[in-house]
Each structure stands twice: as structure tokens, then as C-alpha cells.
Amino acid sequence: MKMVPLITFLSAVVYIYLAIYGLRMKPRTRLSSVFVVLCLCCALWAFCIAFMFSAGNPDSAWLWFRMSAPGWCLGPALLLHFSLVLTEDKESSRYNKIQFLMYIPALIFTVIAMNQGLTANTLTYEKFGWSPLNTGQSPGYWAFTLYYIICIISSIILVWRWGTRATLAREKQQARIVVACTVVGTLLAFINETLLPVLGYFYIPKIPVVLWLIWAFGLWFVITKYGFMIVTPVVATREIIRSIDDLMIMFDVQGKIIEINPPVNNLLLYRDEELLRSRVDKITVNSQAISEIMERLQTEQVDSVQQELDFKTRDGLDIPVELSVSAIRDDFGDVICFVLVARDLRPTLALQNEIAERIRAEAELQIAHADAEKAQKELAESEKMAALGQLIAGIAHEINTPIGAINSSVGSISEAVPVALEQIPEVFLQLNDAGKQEFMNILDTALSVDVVLSMREKRALRKTLTAHLEEAGIPDAAGFADSLVNLGIYDLSDSIPILLLHPQSKPIFAALNNISSLIRGVKNIQTATMKVRKIAFALKNFARFDNSGERIDFDIREGLETVLTLYYHQIKQGTEVVRDYDDVGPIPCYPDELNQVWTNLVNNALHAMDYKGTLTIAVKRPADSQELMVAVSDTGYGMSEEVKAKIFAPFFTTKRAGEGSGLGLDIVKKIIDKHQGRIEVESEVGRGTTFSIFLPVV
């Protein structure tokens, strides 16, 4: 391959390298994209011209020349587009959507060139290869030349004005290099391709695509040395600003706003043209604060400064913001611009106020909850005392009965003791050993008797014993029969006691009766004492109040028995109690509160039966169950579904006025809920009701 085609081909390789370099730029921008397309067009141009130079015949050379048309026809439009993107500001960016119009002439020229050549009428063969030839007589040639010159000059003017207006020395230097390389490269290309052939210098190779490498080299130089198309404020702004939801404002070292994002317009109500190129002080209440931040970032070498201040809207409204201002520096450490990111503090302040309000409301709610718990405890205790008040008359009667028995027994004992002390020595003096033994056997019988006989049963036994004694010829048979019944001897079918045949039988049995009276008095006192003790224990368990607030292990059956003891005076009037207790152990609970549950349920059951019927209490724990069930059933009048739906409502009651507060079952439900348990009710009108309580055992 000859030297000129080789140089042209190598220039195509250089253009391809520059296109790849542009593709790898981070971040990718519209400017770098236009640069890449321009380099690819030049690469196509150089590639086709290289093969044109080395073609073997004129037809092949002419084909390669026409195929190169897209490169040199679109090149001027792409260069102008590149300059527009480089130098555009917010105002000129409005015309982005119509920039494609500049490509219409280029496309027209491309079509003409690919069909007719446009800048060449024919080809001549020179020593370096085939070369396009144009006499300058074609109108299309001069139209393209004029279009070419307009695009190049416009591009140069745009870049030069951008450089003169730039506030940064870096940008001024970039503009000078780009303009110089563009002028030199374009001028040499124009002289080589257009001017020299018109002047008759056909033997000089037409290599404008190679000469354009001067422009490409200039761009590569400013990219690598000055970060051209990479770190300019406009490029950095557009790449960063799209990903920020807060207010973002970029301003230069003089404090003039370069770029803003949409949240700035939305919050401050300014249009873009009202803020761009204006000082940042325009939107701040305290302009001195921004100046101090800029000075600090430039002199103290800090990365960023955070501060709270007020922005002012277009309408004059002050908005509190939290801002962070950072300095953007070049590779030499010089500050090229500032980036301000601000966050509207009004939602945060409103949230803080809301949190404070919620904290206050929560504190009040906790106090109200504590008061409600206290009131409920007092209400439950009041209900418990009310139930105890209803029971107190019957309990007093139950206590008075054994106390009366104790008083009566004490009187009998006090009368019998002196007489017995006189009789026993005299009786024993008159008895032999067999008589003494029988005397003691009769006393043993009297001590072991536990059966309490009614008066009717006693009369029947006296009658039978009198008949036996009369048959045996015992004098005063009726008197001795009465003594035998008192001593617990009810059957004489085996033998007649020998003491009845003793000459001193009457004094002997009188002594036995006195001793028996003493024994019965002591037993009555023991029985009455146990009964009083049981009632007192039940009252103590019922009335106690545990303030620890902690669960304790307790046997539910004990609490049920306590309640049944307190209601004994009402139960014994005509109610049969059926106990169906499984052998269950203690469970963690609040015993005093559960006692109130059993009290309400038993009281309601007795009331529902008018104190006549069957009260069934069951305690069950099914196998493999984590719940213990307590069921209280009655055979009363039952409930309708309508009444059943309301029974747990506060103040609802089916009792007559003065008999119930309507709070009993409401308290029952709250206590069961406190135990994390549940309550179920089954009822049938005319057949009775069953309340089933399920309590967790762990």
C-alpha cells in the first residue's frame, strides 16, 4: 500500500480509538455521545478514502468516494451540534428538540453526494492514487462549501464566546485550545480539498480527513489534561442532580447560580430563568451566612459545611431548611463551584411536634390506663364486698348456730361434771371386775358413736329396746331403754348387759348417762368449733386482696370450696351440689380475683334456680391440653339468645332492682381476659345454663 492510503487508513484507526475513548467516559453525557458519533463519521470518511486512493480502477475508486459521503457531509453538522451542547445554558437548552433541523441540509447533501459526487465531477489518477477532481462549476459544490463554512464558523464562535464568558481559568483554556485546533484543522482541510484544486494543484493528495485529526488531537488533549467533557460544572450538575430528591443548587465561586433541580422550582416557586445567573443570596434570608460558608470552604479546605437557615420563596415566605454545602475542586485543588443540597425542615419539625404530641398523649393515656386499672380494681373489690354483704346475714346465722351449740354443750358439761365426780367412785366400789369391764365397754361404745339421730329415730329405738327389756323382765324398762339409746346401744338381740341385772343398776346407768353427756358435749363443741373455723377461713380467703400483682400457683378447687362454704346457708335450703373434680394440680393465677369469678357464677346459678335445683361444678383438664376448664352449671330458667348476647355488657342485669349492679359478669370477663383465658356460655331456656372458664396452665 502506498504512503497516502496508509496514512489515511491509520487516521481511520485513530478516529475509532477516539470514539471508544468517548464511549468509556464516566459519566456518559450528551456531549460525549455527539463526540463519539462525530469520530465514527470521520472514521468512515477516512476508511473509504483510503480504499479510494488504492482502488484498482476508476469505477471502484468512484464507488469508495461516494461511500465516504456520510462522513464529510454529516461532519460539519455534528461539529456544530457538539459546540451547541458544550456551550448551552438553560435558556438555549429549550431548543434541544429542534436541533435536528441542522441535519436536514447535511442529509440532503449526503444523498446527492452518494449519487453524483457533489464535491467532485470525476477522478484522476495521480502517483499517490486516485484523486477526486472538481472544476468549481457545480452549484451543489458551492452550496455545500457555504454550508460547511457556516457550520465551522458558527462552531468556532460558540466555543469562543463560551470561553470568554467562563468564570474558571480551566474553561477559558479549554475553549482556546478547542478553537485553535478547530481553526487550524478546518483551514488546512479547506485549503487542501477546495482551494488548491480550484487553483489547479491537482497532484496534491486531498486528505482533509487526515488534517481534521488536528481538531481531534486538540479535543483529546483538553480531555486528558483539563478534564474536558468530564468535570465541567454543567456536566457534573446534570449527572448528579437527576438522582437527588432534595433541593440542589450549584453556584460558582462568585455566588452565581449555575444549575438547579426541579424541587427548587416546586418549593421556592421561582422559574428557571429567574434564578439562573442570579446570586444565591436571592433565595436566602441571611445572605451573610452563604458568604461565610463559601469563604470557609475555600480557605479551610473542609469537605462540606452543614447549617440550618431560612430560604425565602418568590412570595416572601420563609422556609426553614437544613443545608449541606460542598466544594467541587479540580485536580489542582482549586474550587471550581459549590453544590448546595437543602432539605425542607417543615416536615421534620411537624414530625417532631407530632412525636412530642404523641409522647404527651401516650403519657396521658398511660395515666388514664393506670387510673382505669385502679378504678377497675376498686370496682372489683367493691363488687366483692357487695357480694359479701349479701352473704353476711346467712354467714352470721351459720356462725350463730355452732356458737349456740357450744353454749348449750358448755351448760350440760358444767352440770354433769360435779354429779359424775360423785357417782363414779361409788359405782366402782359396788362393781366387781366383770362389771367394771362392761362399764368401760359401754363408755367406749358411747365414745365411738358418730351418728346423729333424729327424734323420730330415737323414739323408734326406745320402743324396740323397751320391748326387749320387758321380755327380759327388767323393771323400769322404758327408763333403761332411754339410757341405752343415749349411750348409743341400739340392739339387744345378742345379750342383755349384765349391769341391767345389777342391784344398783339405776345409779350405775345414771353415772353412765352423766359421763355420756360430758362426751357428747365435748363432741358438739369440737364440731361447732370446726364449723366456725371453716367459715372464718372461707371469709378470710374471700376477703383478702393481693397487691403484689404477680401470679402464684394455686389449686382452683380450694377457691371453689371457699365460695361453696360461704353460700352453704343458701345451698342447704334446697340445692344439691354436685362436685366433679379431676385430680388437677395448682396453676399460676390470681386466686383472689378468681374467687370473685366463682362467687359471681355460683350466685347467678343459685339465683337462676330460685335456690332449688342442682348446682354442678366441674374441674377438668383434658389430656395433652394446655388449658384447665372450670364449668359452673345450673338447672334454672336459662337465657334466650338475645339476653345471652348482652350478659357481659356493663350494667346489664336480668335481676330485679336492688338485687344486682349488672357489673358481675363484666368483671368476670375482665378477670378471665387478664388471665389470657376465655369464657364460653351455653344456655337453653327452661333447662339451665353452663359457664365454662378456660385458663392456661402455664
Image (cartoon, helix red, strand yellow):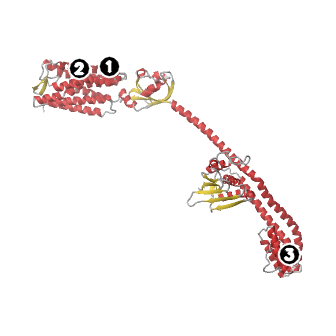
Q: Position of residue 473 (x, y in %)?
A: 86, 81
**Given the image, on which type of amino acid does mark 1 rest?**
Arg
Compare residues 40 and 395 and report the one nearer the observer: 395
Residue occupying the point 53% across, 31% down: 349
Question: Which residue position is annotated with label 3?
Answer: 480
Say which of marks 3 and 2 sits in front.
3
The residue sitting at the front extreme is 686
Distance between the alpha carbons at the discs numbered 1 and 3: 150 Å
Q: Secondary structure at mark 2?
A: helix
Q: Secondary structure at mark 1?
A: helix
Compare residues 592 and 387 and report the one nearer the observer: 387
Question: Which residue position is annotated with label 2?
Answer: 147
Q: Is residue 231 visible?
A: yes
**Disc on res. 161:** 1
Q: How many marks?
A: 3
Q: Secondary structure at mark 3?
A: helix
Distance between the alpha carbons at the discs numbered 1 and 2: 21 Å
